[in-house]
Amino acid sequence: MSNQGIEVLGLHKHFSKRKGLLRRRGAAVHALRDVSFGVERGETYGLLGPNGSGKSTLIRVLSTLLVPDAGQVRLLGHRIPGEEAAVRSKIGRVSVDAAFYKKLSARENLLYSAFLYGMDKARAERRALDILEALGLEGEKFTDPLEEMSRGMQQKVAITRALLVNPPLLLLDEPTTGLDPKSKRDVQTFLENLRSEHGTTILLTSHDMAETERLCPRIGFIAGGRLIAEGTPDELKRIAGADSLDDAFIALAGEGLEEGEAAVKKREAAEPVEA
Amino acid sequence: MEQVLRQTWAFFFRDYHLTRRYMSWVVVFTFYAVVNSATIALIGVAAGDPRLTLTLLVGVVLWNFLSVLFQEIANSITYERWEGTLEYTFMAPVSRLTHLAGVSFFTLFYSVARSFFIVGGLVLFIDLDLSRANVWGALLVLVVSSMAFVGLGLMAAALPVLSPERGAEATNIFQGVLLLVSGVYYPVEVLPGWLQPLAAVSPATYALSACRKLIGIEAAGMGEGAPLSAVTYELAVLAVMGVVLIPLGLYVFGLVETWAKQTGKLKRTG
């Protein structure tokens, strides 16, 4: 059995923009260009990139919600496209926008999700309350409609939903965006415990450098749909000649970069990094 | 098997609680349906024509049942797109058959409950004597015709995956065409000749024809319901439509889902 939790090789994805009254096919937007990387089982891997860099597209491909144009993906040994059914039972995903039935309570939303994964009611309720407590959300909020909760509380329920079935692979797309510092810390601690206690493989995309540096031994920078640099935080700082991960990120994938080309040139000029 | 039952229950559970949370709207819509049905049926009373009254009654009850069944299944995907939950449903380890079966079961339950309220409301306005009608036969026709409407609903449910707004618009137009061509309140013979062929492909046409015979509208002795054997043809056509339309609906939905995953159309909208 491969020790890789996530294997991505030569991944391409483009979208066609339609223009005009007749919705004629316009220019293609290349969301992912030849992206390759690997994440070992039990590893937390961070993916940093500016808005529109391809992070969410990558997460959607790995979540079986997008079919790639080319390339190979294996999640916990299962190939996609091809073995989506096996993959779906093993992944949990949190996206930046907590999508729920807002009129339903946290309990109802979480039970619905648990039933989808074949869990029984008693076990699902117990596990949901345990996770919510660990994330710092009081039990009495459990029966409140989601629409009455703050954005931070909703995000904690979203994280709980992803963890209900204890998936061996977590895909986290900016999971702490909008959380207050205390809540952010609770989530980060929970994710650390999850990895150390359950060996969960985690792919984390974020704009929060401190969070990524804290949680991820290895980080990839993505810009213009390309993975432009990859390594430990120290390696990335060294490549960019920067003192902090923030500076390294701005130097390699920062403002004004078109399609990541400049960053690619910079990476090519830098000394190679051993993954 | 237990897992599949739980997954099917998930959709029933979700839709039950959503209905509960939107109860005031459910009451408003049901009230409107009762009043609308009564105003249509009272046209027959005003004309002093019991046969017309019964024709209109059968039409409103049947159409209310079948149209809600179709509409709720068709709109289930629209609701998910509005809430942004469609991606989570599609990445859950649930087969599309289980997903759409769960949605259809709740919708069937909801449509039946709503129809009971409408019939109950109509009794307040119109003196109904169904003592000689073949009511059980009519219920059987409703069950069989439901299958065909579930199939149509599944096909229409694929439309919001293509485009949330345009999909909902197309669903309403399709429903309107069904209402027009199926002869809900009139014989299809009064339609222009170029429209009449469409009546032959609408399951509602056969459901209405069968129910009118079973309730006794077309009998010499008004209200004398025909035996089930008198509607064998209609039942057979409806059964064939159901057998064809449900797998066809699932197939169409599958095609659209694959297309949406290739083009990135599953993202939240609305």
Image: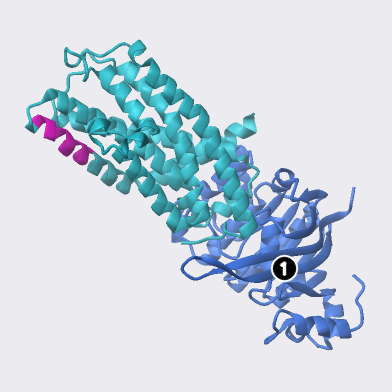
Q: List the residue tagged with mark 1.
A: A32
Residue at 64 percent across and 74 percent down: it is A52
Please check the rendered image and state whether residue B127 is part of the magenta-colored stretch, yes or no: no
Q: Quadrant of the N terminus of chain B?
A: top right
Q: Is residue B37 magenta?
A: yes
Residue A145 falls in image quadrant: bottom left
Counting the numbered discs, the total is 1
Q: Is residue B258 above or below residue B116?
A: below
| Residue A218 percent across, percent down from the top left | 82, 70
Q: Colour of chain B?
A: cyan
Three-letter amino acid code at the position of disc 1: Leu
Q: Which residues are magenta?
A: B34-45
* Position of residue B61 measured from the top left corner of the image (x, y, whole percent): 27, 31
Q: Is residue A129 above or below residue A230?
A: above
Query: A256 and B186: which one is in front?
Result: B186
Q: Is residue A44 above or below residue A214?
A: above
Crowding at label 1, few (<14), some or many (≥20) Cα neighbours within 10 Å?
many
User: Is residue A140 among the parts visible in the rendering?
Assistant: no
Residue lying at 83% horizontally and 65% vertically, measured from the top left? A37
Instruction: Tell me what hue chain A is rendered in.
Output: blue
Q: Is residue B126 left or right of residue A256?
A: left
